[in-house]
């Protein structure tokens, strides 16, 4: 039994319409019904076709980030990074990405547990910074939540360096004077402006 030539565009239109109105999950259900009727192969092809207007599909995303400002006297806890493309050494406070359904404070506590095996108390939010940048030739875009924080275990303040567990990097204390006078680079840009002049 053959498929009517009129069924081919009708199937494609039906599946695309369902996807546009109700989302891809319902479109797959509609496709299953059409397949059961013996005329859904074109709908499958339509759903498999990459869409040019899908930003996530192209890999361009804005990353929510949470970072801790932890001080030891006039020093800031940071990790040192290197961008060979820019020939630049830079520093950034510790933290990481915020997962879906997670508060930025909870994410910060989780990240310190994962990165240093440390428990922190998260205090005042200093601000939120938008960071549009390139790193090793790749574009990036982050929204960073900055919080004051302290270690629960005071012995962490006695360590000059701390190995980051899940990365080939080390955290260390860097004097804020180097960031103030521009001899050292601190990211995200604008962080020094959130710190009070006497700190």
Image: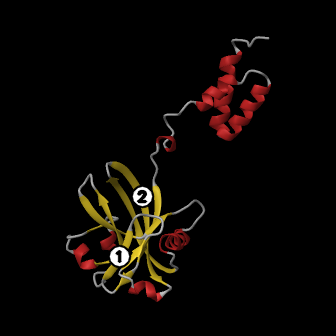
Residue denoted by label 1: 172
Find residue 128 and report its horizontal and vertical position in percent.
Answer: 42, 67
- Residue 196: which quarter of the image? bottom left
Q: Residues within 10 Å of mark 1 (few under 14, many from 20)?
A: some
Residue denoted by label 2: 142
> Which quadrant is the C terminus positioned in?
bottom left
Find residue 105 and report its horizontal and vertical position in percent.
Answer: 52, 72
Q: Is residue 183 left or right of residue 123?
A: left
For image coordinates 79% across by 26% down, the residue present is 36
Looking at the image, is mark 1 or mark 2 nearer the viewer? 1
- Residue 12: which quarter of the image? top right
Element at label 2: strand
Find residue 17 and report its horizontal and vertical position in percent.
Answer: 65, 31
Please report whichever mark, 1 or 2, sits nearer to the chain's N-terminal start.
2
Find residue 157 and report its horizontal and vertical position in percent.
Answer: 40, 85
Q: Is residue 171 left or right of residue 27?
A: left
Q: Which of the colour schemes (rainbow, by chain, secondary structure, one colour) is used?
A: secondary structure
């Amino acid at each position: 039994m053959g498929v009517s030539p009129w069924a081919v565009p009708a199937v494609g239109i039906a599946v695309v319409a369902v996807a546009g109105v109700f989302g891809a999950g319902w479109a797959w259900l509609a496709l299953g019904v059409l397949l059961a009727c013996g005329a859904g192969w074109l709908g499958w092809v339509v759903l498999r076709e990459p869409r040019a207007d899908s930003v996530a599909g192209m890999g361009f995303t804005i990353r929510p980030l949470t970072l801790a400002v932890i001080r030891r006297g006039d020093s800031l806890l940071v990790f040192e990074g290197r961008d060979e493309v820019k020939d630049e050494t830079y520093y950034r406070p510790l933290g990481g990405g915020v997962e879906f359904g997670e508060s930025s404070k909870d994410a910060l506590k989780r990240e310190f547990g994962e990165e240093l095996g440390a428990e922190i108390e998260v205090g005042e939010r200093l601000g939120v910074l938008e960071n549009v940048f390139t790193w090793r030739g790749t574009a990036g875009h982050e929204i960073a939540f900055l919080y004051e924080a302290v270690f629960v275990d005071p012995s962490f303040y006695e360590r000059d360096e701390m190995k980051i567990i899940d990365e080939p990097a080390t955290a260390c204390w860097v004097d804020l004077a180097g960031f103030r006078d521009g001899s050292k680079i601190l990211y995200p840009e604008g962080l020094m402006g959130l710190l009070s002049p006497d700190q």
